[in-house]
Image: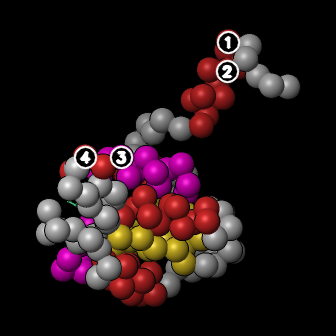
Amino acid sequence: MVGDVVDWAALHTAAVTAMRAAYCPYSHFPVGVAGLVDDGRIVSGCNVENAAYGVGLCAECGMVSQLHLTGGGRLVAVYCVGGDGEALMPCGRCRQLLWENGGPDCRLMTPEGILPMRDVLPQAFGRDDLDQAAVREGNTDE
Ligand code: THU
């Protein structure tokens, strides 16, 4: 199964390539990220900032957009890097993006080694919470 054996070197190369395309004239902090999808493809993204600072896009936003644009699927492994090419921890918001599109078993390269998302975003809010609330309130579609 894709994800059992992850080519972390290939993911790192894709993340660094993406990082080099970053548009970050305000922070001067380039970020690149690459993800392995459960069908074997690799998707990637870079941060894209804006003169209206608050609407800047994190690298993970671009990667998740490419994931859906190119056929969807689930992220099974993710490598995020900063300008030095070293592993970078995704911001809190982007951990939520990874949770939605990879779930608890998706593995992330971190400065402390490879960790599953269940450890990177403990007690995460997700679809299950919405589904459980709908059941409690009797708002299911079935
Ligand atoms: N950034 C990302 O692209 N992903 C992260 O997970 C952390 C932060 C970007 C946003 C901004 O363009 C720059 O890094 C500095 O915060």
For the image shown, how many numbered marks are present on the structure? 4
Seen from the viewer's position, the closer of residues 137 and 5 is 137
Q: Which residue is mark 1?
A: 137
Question: Does residue 32 belong to the magenta stretch?
Answer: no
Question: Which residue ends up furthest to the front in the rendered image?
Answer: 51
Q: Which residue is mark 4?
A: 54
> Within 10 angstroms of label 4, few (less than 14), some, or many (20 or more) residues?
few
Helix, strand or loop for disc 3? helix
Q: Which residue is mark 2?
A: 134
Q: Is mark 2 within 8 Å of ligand 1?
A: no
Disc 3 from disc 4: Cα separation: 13 Å
> Which mark, residue 93?
3
Question: In the figure, 17 relative to 115: above or below?
Answer: below
Disc 1 from disc 2: Cα separation: 5 Å
Helix, strand or loop for disc 2? helix
Question: In the figure, 72 relative to 52: above or below?
Answer: below
Q: Position of residue 63 (x, y in %)?
A: 47, 66
Instruction: Judge from the rendering whether residue 78 lies leftward or rightward of residue 142; answer left or right.
Output: left
